[in-house]
Amino acid sequence: MELTLDRLSVTANGTTLLRELSLDVPGGGVVGLVGPNGSGKSTALRCVYRALRPHTGTVRIGGDDLHALPLRDSARRLAALTQENTVDLDFTVRELVALGRTPHNAGNQALSRRERDLCEWAMERMDVARLADRGVLTLSGGERQRVLVARALVQEPSVLVLDEPTNHLDVRHQIQLLSLLRGSGLTVLVVLHDLNLASASCDRLGVLRDGRLVAAGPPTEVLTAELVRDVFGVEATVVTHPVTGDPQLLYALTTHDSGRTTP
Amino acid sequence: MTSTTNTPEDRLPAHDDAPERTEGQHPPPRPAPSWTGLAVGAVGLLVLLAGSVVLAIGLGPSVISPADTARHLWAALTGGTIPASEVTVQQIVWQVRTPRVLLAVVVGAGLSLVGVAIQAMVRNALADPFILGVSSGASVGAVSVSVFGGLAVLGVHAVSAGAFLGALGASALVYLAARSRAGVTPLRLVLTGVALSFGFQAVMSLLIYLAPSGEATSMVLYWTMGSFGAATWSTLPLVAVAVLVAVVVLVRNARRLDVLSLGDETAVSLGIDTHRLRVGLFVLTSVVTGAMVAVSGAIGFVGLVIPHLTRIVVGASHGRVLVIAPLVGAVLMVWADLLARTLVAPRELPLGVITALVGVPVLLTLMRRRGYLFGGR
């Protein structure tokens, strides 16, 4: 299912957070949003998972205006991993994952056999099945993050939107998660901070600065030393990954404003 | 914005899901009770409640055995006849104690229920039914009626009506003051409620200061500590219906409340209209709390503690908590009221004293034993 952001603008308290952002995520494609802190990545995603209504512009999902759909209908098509990593109540992992079925079931309807199997599958995929009976508040940040991804998978969406999904994850689980996204066949829009992981996992990247899209295209075209210097203000050497051929960035800790030493 | 990732996890020097962690460091797995377990628990509590009610009706200045109490209740319910020598006992059982004990059942259940709903609505473990200013608003309403008169057409119910209107007025004020363009956010709601509560208390103090009469002062004690001393058959139906409606509505929305605790943004992404849900909860809890405060004053602690006690035992899922918490609250309240009216008879202790003295140690003990978590470590 295709996801299209069409000239989205968002202002809050007189500040423009997002300016005329247009971005296409083709069906089954993985598109990454990167940019410095405060560049509008999360704002863009919030418009997509409907926590925020853009002041102008539209989000289309499979051709329909997303914000015109009933919330429940859009929740059946699109699942989100937000930055809210906190949960108030000590649900068990199994209970929390099962909440992903909410948009598909009426009221308190019990899960069917198939849905319970689906939950088990998602917990296996995210490597949290052995935690199924643990309270989520006893988990570490990384474990909880994986539980929340499992919850999003159980929603059986066509489009998956993730805001920094690799937060808190150790390197093995980062690689596992991004591989899963690539191989899922879902339409994925993901915000990532790690440019090397973004390069490895995304078909296309959109680069945001001050709420504007300043570059978009395949990682090989977008991730250049000039752009990284320009947008992120760091010097990086771009090399080609010897195995995958993806562009990868190498950083040196000393920056141009010399005199400062790293602790 | 993406820059704000200062969750507690980030501030820790090291992530604790490093591979070397062993299973032994975790608390043992805690499977949620099964549905049959829940049904057994609910039926058990109902039996306990029925027994407590009969026992509590029998106890007081004149002690009536449970068997005699049951016989009198049966006679009153079925219109059966009793010997003329027992008419006084019948009066005590049916006209004095039964409505009082039943009111304790209704209010105990209602406060626990509203406590669960409010804690979910404002996403705060410290929330109780009175956190949004309902009780102090009710006191202002009740004291104004007794000081200035008014609502005289309602006769003996004038003060209760004043309390109810005060409660609703306070809720409406809190809601309007907390509303912003982004809707009503949980923290704003709590802060506004706490702030306005202080305001209402100041108004009440002013009223008492300006009209210094012993009656007004004792009324304040009544409204702030609570009592079922004024219970009659006529006070019962309205509040009972309100609590029953709340049980049905909340249980039907149990899963929505579960989803709300994942955060508003996640809830929206799961298809829940959080704004509408929160407004609905606000109206429901305000009306029910107002109805309860109007007949019994603000009985503290029950609405804060019973939800936590229940979660410690049955887990977090609202489908279970909303069934068990009202029953636990009802049983506790029947006993609290019994203690309040018998411990120092013929005087009566304020109910809030009993609920706090019993509730605090129970909660602290359970928290320490079960490693209870709400909203983080």
Image: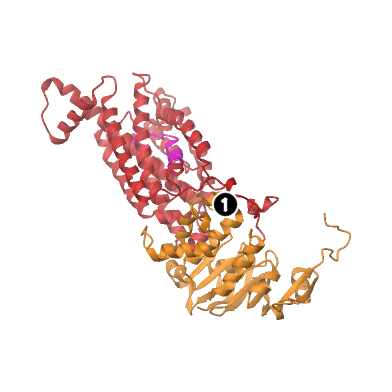
Chain colours: A orange, B red
Is residue B153 at all visible to an observer of this figure? no
Extent of the magenta region:
B288-310
Residue drawn at x 44%, y 29% is B358
Horizontal side, residue B257 vs residue B238: left or right: right
Q: Is residue B271 magenta?
A: no
- Rendered image quadrant of residue A55: bottom right
Query: A21 or A45: which is nearer to us?
Result: A45
Does residue B343 lie above or below A133 as drawn? above
| Chain containing mark 1 | A
Q: Position of residue A240 (x, y in %)?
A: 75, 77
Residue that carries the numbered disc 1 in the rendered image: A139
Instruction: For mark 1, give the secondary structure.
Output: loop
Q: Position of residue B373 (x, y in %)?
A: 53, 45
Q: Position of residue A89 (x, y in %)?
A: 50, 49
Judged by its main secondary structure, the magenta piece is helix
Does residue B344 lie above or below B295 as drawn? above
Name the image quarter holding the C terminus of chain B: top right
Q: Residues within 10 Å of mark 1 (few under 14, many from 20)?
A: some
